[in-house]
Amino acid sequence: MGRYTGICAAQQGAVNDSLGLAKTVTLGKPLVMSRLAAFILPDRFIAVLLVTVALAALLPVRGEALALLGHVSTATIVALFFVHGARLGRDAVLGGFTRLQLHGAVLAMTFVAFPIAGFLIAWLFAPVIGATLTPGLLFLCALPSTVASSIAAVSMARGHVAASVVAAALSNMAGVVLTPLIFALLVSAAGAPFGLGAIGKVLLMLALPFALGQIARPLIGPLIEAHPVVAKSLDRLTILLAAYVALSAAAGGGLLGAIDAGEYATLALFMFGLLALAIATALAAGHALGFDHGDRMVLLFNGIQKSAVSGAPMARIFFPGAEAGLIIVPLLIYYIPMLTISAIMAARFGAIRETR
């Protein structure tokens, strides 16, 4: 564990600085509720994301402006994965091998249990969900875990923060390769069309910058770690741009309007059901594997969360046209309650832990 303590401490410090959760569980109930509110709307980002979605639906950008904004979005995607490659230390990944059972369980939850659940939901309830939204559901289930929010939730719940950092790093590095492969397999199995050439685009636009970032880490890694606000801001800018471009294209093409309120409500019910199933599975698996409280919190929060930072850019690469807007709709509907419920559960687990 000693080999990656430094990077774990550095990344946890960045999370605590950005989300203000370092002392949440030690300074009393009023402060817990204050920090909980800040976690649900970290720097009001969720509110900004909701406004972005509304703007894309009501005032979509079109024509040459859409094309130009698309190029800007693509540039931020490439920059984002380069920065992520530079900020993730190889020592952290190597250190993860000291806890194979825990990290194997998190990866299995993310890249095995979720895809199976998504496929079964799509297969059993295809007529209810509809062919338009089914690819987005499958895409959501193939995504890696979050980074900052999962680590922050584990910290709030008094879990093993260092192990959560490693789990998040492993999930996101694996997701660059596994997400497009799993998504292609799921979509093909569900009978929907999907061009395999999109996998090559993902590898070129995400894996290559990530690899270059790893190569450049000795030169720029310390600078990025010393200024975590840069990576945090780039994360959020990438999500907002990718979401606005994708949803604008979908709204301009009439795709969002083709889905009625009942279909959106039905999708929301399935997203809440998927989240509840993921929570129950993670809790049961943690007890069945004999994990202590700290490791159970890592499996829970790293296992149930899905990354919009990876999802929104990947959707734009998979489907550069209006279809990308439909692909990210299930992700956005899952993402907001995911953060809210994670925050509530983390505060509760942390408070219980403090009383023992």
Image (spheres, rainbow, N blue to C red):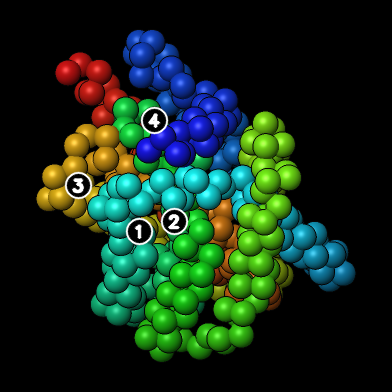
Quick one: label 3 or label 2, which is nearer the N terminus? Answer: 2
Whether residue 319 appears in this view of the structure is no
Q: Secondary structure at mark 3?
A: helix
The residue drawn where x is 67% and y is 42% is 221
Closest to the observer, 329 or 167: 167
Residue bearing mark 4: 155
Q: Is residue 36 left or right of residue 353?
A: right
In the image, what residue type sits under mark 3? Gly
Label located before the other in sequence (4 or 3): 4
Residue occupied by mark 3: 286
Q: Quadrant of residue 105?
A: bottom left
In the rendered image, the quadrant that contains the N terminus is top left
**Above or below: residue 185 compared with residue 15:** below
Answer with mark 1 or mark 2, whichever residue precedes in sequence.
1
Q: Mark 4, residues whose alpha carbon is within 10 Å: few (<14), some, or many (≥20)? A: many
For label 2, the residue is: 171
Q: Position of residue 256 (x, y in %)?
A: 59, 68
> Residue 46: x, y in percent?
56, 41
Residue 47 falls left or right of residue 348? right
- Callout 2: 10 Å neighbours few (<14), some, many (20+)? many
Q: Mark 3 or mark 1, which is nearer the start of the sequence? A: 1
Q: Amino acid at mark 2?
A: Ser
Q: Are marks 1 and 2 in contact (CB under 8 Å)?
A: yes
Residue beneath disc 1 = 107
